[in-house]
Image (tube, rainbow, N blue to C red):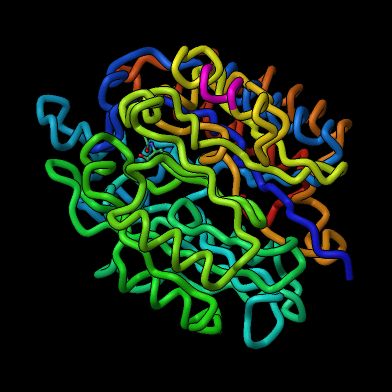
Amino acid sequence: MALVEINFDGLVGPSHNYAGLSLGNLASSSNAGEVSYPRAAALQGLGKMRHNLGLGLTQGLFAPLPRPNPAFLGALGLGSIDDADLAQRRLRAAAWSASSMWTANAATVSPAPDTADGRCHLTAANLVTMPHRSQEWPDTVRQLRLAFASSAHFAVHDAVPPCFGDEGAANHMRMCAGHDAPGLEIFVYGKTGGAFPARQHEQASRAVARLHGLDPARCLFVEQSPEAIAAGAFHNDVVAVANERVLFAHEQAFADPDGTYAAIRARLPEAEIVVVPASVVTLGDAIRSYLFNAQLLTLPTGEMGLVIPLEAWETPSVRGWLDAHIASNGPIRRMFPVDVKQSMANGGGPACLRLRVVADPSTVNPRFLLDEAKIARIEAVVGSFWPEQIDPVDLGRESLAQNIIAARAALLDLLEMPELA
Ligand code: SUG
């Protein structure tokens, strides 16, 4: 059995819009009310998938969830919306949100070498902190059960109880000698973030670790620094990312950085910890540029590459650090800037757009795996069906709703996934 890391990217849905729904996510708040470009957004995401496939990596896809979601509004007693009522308009925007594109929040994943029963375990994230995200998990779990249907190889769990906020893989890092070796699983939770909510609760992380049958000796529970949350790092993956033996983090990512690094080194002596000092890249620049919301990947050559947003490449302090890292022969050898600006404007960089699953690709439902030809066919559907633009004042318009529903149906048709219709 050949275990490899598979990146499952969320296709940007046809309702992608800027409604400003995520308090504590500075990009979402500052772009509230802007016109979005769903077609361009989905094509940018597909461009990233093609890029990573071209690097020789295994690439998967998750379909957007059904939107607008009438069940969400129905459960709130909102059969119709009073347009004069801001709270009702925001709830309607929530029902139209395309936020499931950020599949790093779909689930937490523990690969087979880490678990007691030798299967890969996935727990859907309840995403309770943000109303627009809290509606995702039942549909997400349906999709996960279809993609990872082989119960000999996978166990898919429902979300943990919503009294404990869980935001999935965005707050979870796995370090190991190689993807197929037993890993150290690092769960990062928040306690406080000043004016902003701490979305990941420690007890949710501990519950996921138990459900997955992880060895407590190979788990760490680490507090995210309150300053990072207050500065706009609403998930750990905005300030840190890990791959195999390398942790790449901002100096202010963790509440107790030295204690965290020491605990990692004690459990994984080969760990290489690359810390970007605040004196070189401020927390503000790190969050604006999304340097750490990067895909840190092991390339087929064995080298590590970093798929970063263009915004990071174009930020002088970040570029200076990246150039110096390469020149000093640091562990990250190659940089790949990609354009995911439409997603970035809602606070989702290259790493938010993907869920990493270490598995044997032959055990995954092949309908969720991509090759060049399938990407081209998806691009054609996006080109024909995805709305070119959405002004947030158009949310609620019946003809737009029909357009969005038809677009998703055309995609599911192409992907041969009638189960998700
Ligand atoms: O949950 N943005 C998402 C971005 C998620 C990024 N994911 C990771 N860091 N892994 C969020 O805040 C914006 C939607 C809006 O404002 O309409 C939004 O949901």
Q: Quadrant of residue 89?
A: top left
Outermost residue toward the front in this view:
328
Front-lying residue, 83 or 125: 125
Quarter of the rendered structure image containing ligand 1: top left
The magenta stretch spans which residues? 320-324
Residue 309 image position (x, y, % from top left): 55, 24
Residue 369 image position (x, y, % from top left): 79, 48
Residue 205 in the figure: left or right of residue 149: left
Front-lying residue, 282 or 358: 282
Residue 263 in the figure: left or right of residue 192: right
Residue 88 in the figure: left or right of residue 348: left
Outermost residue toward the bottom in this view:
117
Q: Visible in this render: residue 139?
A: no
* Residue at 51% over, 40% down: 352
Front-lying residue, 419 or 248: 248
Residue 166 counted in the magenta span? no
- For the N terminus, the quadrant is bottom right
The mark total stands at 0
* Residue at 75% over, 76% down: 153
Residue 103 image position (x, y, % from top left): 54, 47
* Residue at 41% over, 40% down: 250
Front-lying residue, 91 or 258: 258
Q: Quadrant of residue 88?
A: top left
381 lies above or below 351: above
Residue 171 image position (x, y, % from top left): 43, 55
Q: Visible in this render: residue 176?
A: yes
* Residue at 49% over, 74% down: 219
